[in-house]
């Protein structure tokens, strides 16, 4: 019988398929014991499951490349660390040996012990890490029952679950899953961002999905509207086929824009840069006609290895990125480890009381001066092969920019003394993602050659709202008057001093926000290559003069609703 369920749109696209329901990892396991003579066999069974999960994660890690290697790899690395945690494994071993519990029940008991510790923490970020524990526990529980291949043969199916981890998404798509519905989740989560990059339709917050949908039910989902149709009728099927045809037609049209200029209706050229993590991303950016690489994340070199990459290893990566852009500028961001990006070497602290506000970004680089010196040497050496810039993350004031500027100048003197071929000058920029940097910008902008606004963290810190916290979904939003005023002020400061300003982050990749950004005075955006053509199409439908004339009305908006009304009244085209 046809039913209509509603959720929140998280990743555009239309999908039609049979439901594959995966119930939450509640671990409602009854107490069960074993005989003393079965202890060794039960321990062996448990450790086989651990080895199986390790092998699965390692296999997935090896299959990833480009942006997915960075984004999903971070979660896989974290889950691998949790899987090796002595507190988890030895605790389960002890429960099996001394309590004579089955591995399943010991898994439940140990999970509850660890959860009690996390729930007692004051810091909400650390409390939220119990989700990662649950995902690892869920993998172990499935492996204990040989359910590793539970989604094999899932071609043409739509996964219905309570939540989906970022590390699962590429795996699900490879197994043939055509869409995902979650009972919880947020369109601002890492999973949603990755689903959009994968073009995998995703509907989140469909609270009734697990109660209403059964295995094998036919579903039609629209990731653009958040609607889910259970047992669609003829009209629904016609609508699905029409949307699918529109998507194919849209992609063909977008491909025609690869070589077209990013120019508004009234003739203003807008720079579209690309965010990248690997040479694959850089190659894609070049093919799509990006103006250059606006943000090259260097963390991927550090996250995948148990040893720090040396100067030559870093140099080769940066050189290859510069060569791949064939003369277009590459902006290399210095190391931005910390917060939820803990590397295997132990360089980034894992046990900070409040990692989002801790030793991360430029703070970590300055605290490890040898690390910064090595990275700057590698970057400067790559400058001999083409134009590049250096971008400093997590700047809170001028002292940090000055320290990096001095370190860069020292490196340039060293390399010239060694007879290296390097650029005459290397532009240095600051990421404006900490409110103090935005407010103090007039006092240190003279140290910068360019600016990049990191909106993901800026919004988070400005509103004191974790963007991954579902409970704060209504609060975390770039559509806040304070956010718009900070953006406007940073852009004006840059314009007065003749310093180019780029916006990077999810706000730059969303076509719906493009008119707002142009109205605020921005003329440079940096975004993932997956959305570059959509944003180019939107810009080509905008009249920059009209949007700038409407900017005062935008800045007079008193709340999110007022800003949304402005966007509705000033769409592209």
Image (cartoon, rainbow, N blue to C red):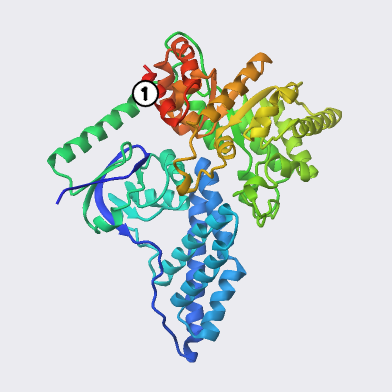
Image: 376 above or below 489: below
In the rendered view, does 223 fall on the left or right side of 97?
left
Determine the image quadrant of residue 120: bottom right
In the rendered view, does 193 fall on the left or right side of 296?
left
Q: Can residue 328 be seen in this snapshot?
A: no
Determine the image quadrant of residue 418: top right
In the image shown, does 555 or 70 lie closer to the viewer? 555
Spot occupied by residue 252 in the image (x, y as percentages of width and height) = 33, 26
Q: Which residue is mark 1?
A: 568
What is the number of callouts on the image? 1
In the image shown, does 331 or 185 lie closer to the viewer? 185
Determine the image quadrant of residue 430: top right
Spot occupied by residue 79 in the image (x, y as percentages of width and height) = 54, 58
Query: Which residue appears at 34% of the width and 58% of the height?
Result: 152
Q: Residues within 10 Å of mark 1 (few under 14, many from 20)?
A: few
Spot occupied by residue 198 in the image (x, y as percentages of width and height) = 41, 41
């Amino acid at each position: 019988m046809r039913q209509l369920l509603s959720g929140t749109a998280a990743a555009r696209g239309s999908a039609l398929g049979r439901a594959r329901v995966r119930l939450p990892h509640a671990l409602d396991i009854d107490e069960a014991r074993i005989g003393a003579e079965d202890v060794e066999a039960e321990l062996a069974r448990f450790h086989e499951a651990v080895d199986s999960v390790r092998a699965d994660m390692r296999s997935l890690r090896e299959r990833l490349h480009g942006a997915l290697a960075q984004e999903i790899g971070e979660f896989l690395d974290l889950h691998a660390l949790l899987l090796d945690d002595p507190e988890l494994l030895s605790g389960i071993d002890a429960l099996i040996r001394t309590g004579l519990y089955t591995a399943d029940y010991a898994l439940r008991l140990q999970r509850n012990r660890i959860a009690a510790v996390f729930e007692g923490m004051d810091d909400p970020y650390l409390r939220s890490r119990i989700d990662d524990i649950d995902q690892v526990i869920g993998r172990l529980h499935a492996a204990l029952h040989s359910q590793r291949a539970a989604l094999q043969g899932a071609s043409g199916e739509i996964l219905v679950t309570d939540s989906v981890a970022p590390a699962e998404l590429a795996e699900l798509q490879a197994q043939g899953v055509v869409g995902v519905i979650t009972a919880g989740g947020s369109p601002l989560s890492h999973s949603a961002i990755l689903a959009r990059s994968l073009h995998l339709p995703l509907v989140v917050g469909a609270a009734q999905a697990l109660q209403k949908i059964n295995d094998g039910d036919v579903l039609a989902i629209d990731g653009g509207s958040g609607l889910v149709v259970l047992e669609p009728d003829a009209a629904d099927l016609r609508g699905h086929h029409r949307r699918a045809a529109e998507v194919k037609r849209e992609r063909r049209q977008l491909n025609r824009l690869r070589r077209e200029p990013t120019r508004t209706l009234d003739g203003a050229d807008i720079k579209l840069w690309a965010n990248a993590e690997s040479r694959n991303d850089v190659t894609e950016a070049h093919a799509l006609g990006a103006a250059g690489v606006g943000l090259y994340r260097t963390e991927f070199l550090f996250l995948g290895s148990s040893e720090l990459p040396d100067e030559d290893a870093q140099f080769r990566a940066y050189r290859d990125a510069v060569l791949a852009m064939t003369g277009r500028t590459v902006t290399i961001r210095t190391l931005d480890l910390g917060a939820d990006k803990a590397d295997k070497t132990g360089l980034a602290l894992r046990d900070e009381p409040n990692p989002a506000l801790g030793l991360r970004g430029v703070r970590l680089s300055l605290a490890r001066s040898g690390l910064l010196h090595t990275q700057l040497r590698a970057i400067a050496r790559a400058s001999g092969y083409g134009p590049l810039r250096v971008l400093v993350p997590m700047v809170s004031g001028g002292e940090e920019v000055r320290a990096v500027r001095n370190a860069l100048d020292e490196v340039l003197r060293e390399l010239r003394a060694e007879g290296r071929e390097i650029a005459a000058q290397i532009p240095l920029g600051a990421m404006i993602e900490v409110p103090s940097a935005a407010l103090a910008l007039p006092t240190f902008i003279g140290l910068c050659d360019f600016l990049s606004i990191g909106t993901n963290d800026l919004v988070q810190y400005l509103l004191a709202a974790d963007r991954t916290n579902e409970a704060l979904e209504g609060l975390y939003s770039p559509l806040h008057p304070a956010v718009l005023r900070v953006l406007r002020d940073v852009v004006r400061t840059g314009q007065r001093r003749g310093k180019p300003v780029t916006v990077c982050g999810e706000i730059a990749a969303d076509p719906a926000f493009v008119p707002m950004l142009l109205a605020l005075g921005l003329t440079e955006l940096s975004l993932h290559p997956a959305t570059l053509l959509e944003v180019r199409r939107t810009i080509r439908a905008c009249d920059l003069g009209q949007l700038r004339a409407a900017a005062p009305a935008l800045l007079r908006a008193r709340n999110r609703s007022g800003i949304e009304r402005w966007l509705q009244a000033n769409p592209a085209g």
